């Protein structure tokens, strides 16, 4: 759930994170529907890719327990239905938290079978704090500017440097957005979704979420089960690990996925020339990391930036050929050009990424209790690093502002639910960002749900990405509510994963066009 972008003896740093705030109760009381949002005024905002897209906005209460108080603005997008049969609004969310959903509406409407999309108003939205919604958060512009300290704190000095960054970020958020941060959380966004529903004049919504969007959908379904018509969850967040434990579990899965990439590079030695032994290829990658720590490529790709560049390969194997080219060019010839280009394409942060990270932090730090004693973070992440070094400390620092967050945490909502119509879940067995167990757990928690498993798949976000088997189940469900039942084991249906890509030097395309488009919209660490 991320979006691109030794032992310390300093007692002062430990004490800075040792204060513990008592968590608030799960969510806020369900407020009466006394706030009536105006009907959206849709205007054309089509693009070359999505020419029928329309845009609007809706005002919602900042604090849903005070509907007469301050209002904020949410940006909406829509591809309207064109068929006589109308099945209502289909709200889509790309995850994050912090991901913009405006373009996703256009993508989903264009990627679904025309006859299916024609029966829905496909609705995208920028959640509170995100993108075109107002106000939009940007706690510390340039927070990810290169070159950052090495994520692995092999000395007290390196650990202090990283701690200073995250403490500064948390403090900046508190200074700039003291009045907003208590209301940037999953439960508030869920209530925003219900305001959108009312503004659209719909008694029920259909919902389709990827990644964190699955948790958002599950919480909406828990709080408003009678308002859910259809529910699609793709790459499912495990709600029992929100959020500290989930991030630790990610580290193991990303390490496995990175090693799968190393094995792929070894398999294609003819293209990359790094040997046929995956362990030796992996050793070459860590040697590259050590060299860049001392001498960053192009003055901008150090150890941290290298990890940022290769983490997207854990989300989507369509990036593997580009990453392998950059890896090979540097490892064999010390050619930094492809590596710098890969960093700029996959990892360099811009204003949108700064905004996404600010909202990501605000939501995750507010949603749940995080350890406030840095000694626990140090212990847990060194333990993970010993077994799964690829992303362990990079991920720790990505989330470490939550140890110093200036707002008291809530408790996560329990999403167990037996009041829903059949929901449809999709999960790849080797997904790194939302590991497989999350799909199994939510399948168990949502009575009458069906789970479609992509066997051997390692991508994050698997429907509408080129797998016809998965997409047939999605289309059938959105057409008339049909779900598969009674497959082998925990899954109700199993689809084979698509083959891994070929090197760019081959005649085969490196990835499907739809897959590349979708993963560009979902982003990384999302």
Image (cartoon, rainbow, N blue to C red):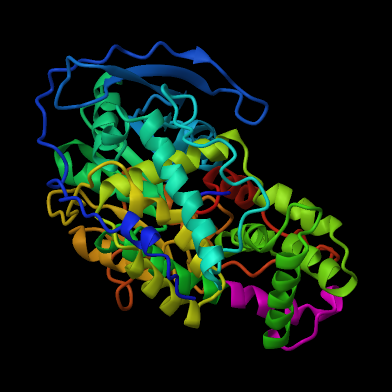
Within the magenta stretch, is there residue 263?
yes
The residue at 20%/27% (across/down) is 203
The image quadrant that residue 180 belongs to is top left
Asked whether the viewer can see residue 95, the reply is no
Residue 9, placed above or below residue 237: below
Percent coordinates x, y for residue 273 in the rendering: 85, 78
The residue nearer to you, when weighing 309 against 49, is 309
The image quadrant that residue 424 belongs to is bottom left
The residue at 56%/40% (across/down) is 353
Residue 158, placed above or below residue 166: below
Left or right of residue 344: residue 381: left
The residue nearer to you, when weighing 154 against 466, is 154
Asked whether the viewer can see residue 218, the reply is yes
Percent coordinates x, y for residue 107 in the rendering: 55, 38
Within the magenta stretch, is there residue 330?
no
The residue nearer to you, when weighing 56 against 451, is 56
Q: How many marks?
A: 0
The image quadrant that residue 429 belongs to is bottom left
Quadrant showing the N terminus: bottom left
Left or right of residue 129: residue 499: right
- State whether the magenta stretch is mostly helix, strand or loop: helix
Residue 141, placed above or below residue 334: above
What stretch of residues is rendered in magenta? 258-278
The residue nearer to you, when weighing 122 against 64, is 64
Left or right of residue 400: residue 318: right
The residue at 59%/47% (across/down) is 144
Percent coordinates x, y for residue 21 in the rendering: 19, 50
């Amino acid at each position: 759930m991320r979006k691109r972008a030794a032992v310390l003896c300093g007692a002062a740093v430990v004490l800075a994170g040792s204060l513990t705030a008592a968590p608030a109760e799960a969510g806020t009381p369900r407020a009466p529907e006394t706030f009536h949002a105006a009907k959206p005024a849709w205007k054309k905002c089509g693009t070359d890719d999505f020419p029928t897209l329309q845009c609007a906005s809706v005002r919602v209460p900042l604090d849903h327990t005070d509907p007469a108080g301050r209002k904020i603005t949410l940006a909406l997008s829509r591809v309207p239905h064109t068929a006589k049969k109308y099945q209502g609004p289909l709200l889509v969310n790309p995850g994050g938290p912090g991901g913009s959903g405006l373009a996703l509406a256009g993508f989903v409407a264009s990627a679904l079978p025309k006859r299916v999309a024609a029966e829905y108003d496909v609705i995208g939205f920028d959640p509170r704090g995100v993108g075109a919604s107002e106000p939009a958060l940007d706690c510390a512009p340039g927070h990810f500017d290169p070159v950052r300290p090495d994520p692995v704190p092999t000395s007290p000095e390196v650990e202090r440097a990283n701690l200073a960054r995250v403490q500064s970020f948390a403090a900046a958020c508190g200074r700039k957005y003291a009045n907003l941060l208590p209301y940037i959380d999953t439960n508030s966004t869920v209530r925003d979704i219900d305001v959108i529903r009312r503004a659209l004049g719909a008694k029920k919504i259909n919902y389709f979420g990827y990644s964190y969007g699955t948790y958002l959908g599950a919480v909406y379904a828990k709080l408003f089960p009678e308002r859910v018509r259809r529910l699609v969850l793709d790459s499912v967040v495990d709600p029992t690990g929100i959020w500290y434990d989930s991030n630790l579990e990610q580290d193991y899965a990303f390490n496995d996925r990175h090693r799968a990439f190393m094995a792929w590079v070894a398999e294609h030695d003819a293209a990359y020339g790094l040997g046929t032994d995956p362990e030796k290829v992996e050793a070459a990658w860590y040697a590259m990391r050590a060299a860049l720590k001392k001498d960053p490529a192009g003055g901008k790709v150090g150890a941290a930036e290298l990890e940022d560049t290769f983490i997207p390969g854990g989300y989507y194997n369509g990036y593997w050929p580009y990453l392998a080219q950059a890896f090979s060019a540097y490892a064999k010839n010390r050619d930094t050009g492809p590596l710098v280009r890969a960093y700029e394409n996959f990892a360099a942060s811009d204003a949108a990424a700064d905004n996404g990270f600010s909202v990501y932090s605000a939501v995750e730090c507010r949603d749940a209790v995080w350890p406030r004693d840095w000694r626990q973070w140090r212990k847990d992440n060194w333990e993970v690093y010993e077994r799964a070094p690829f992303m362990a400390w990079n991920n720790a620092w990505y989330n470490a502002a939550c140890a110093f967050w200036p707002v008291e945490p809530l408790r996560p909502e329990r999403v167990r639910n037996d009041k829903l119509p059949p929901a449809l879940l999709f999960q790849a067995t080797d997904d790194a960002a939302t590991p497989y167990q999350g799909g199994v757990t939510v399948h168990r928690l949502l009575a009458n749900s069906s789970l479609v498993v992509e066997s051997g798949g390692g991508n994050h976000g698997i429907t509408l990405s080129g797998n016809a088997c998965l997409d047939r189940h999605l289309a059938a469900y959105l057409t008339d509510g049909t779900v598969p039942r009674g497959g082998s084991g925990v899954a109700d249906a199993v689809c084979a994963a698509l083959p891994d890509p070929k090197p760019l030097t081959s005649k085969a395309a490196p990835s499907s066009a739809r897959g590349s488009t979708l993963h560009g919209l979902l982003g990384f660490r999302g």
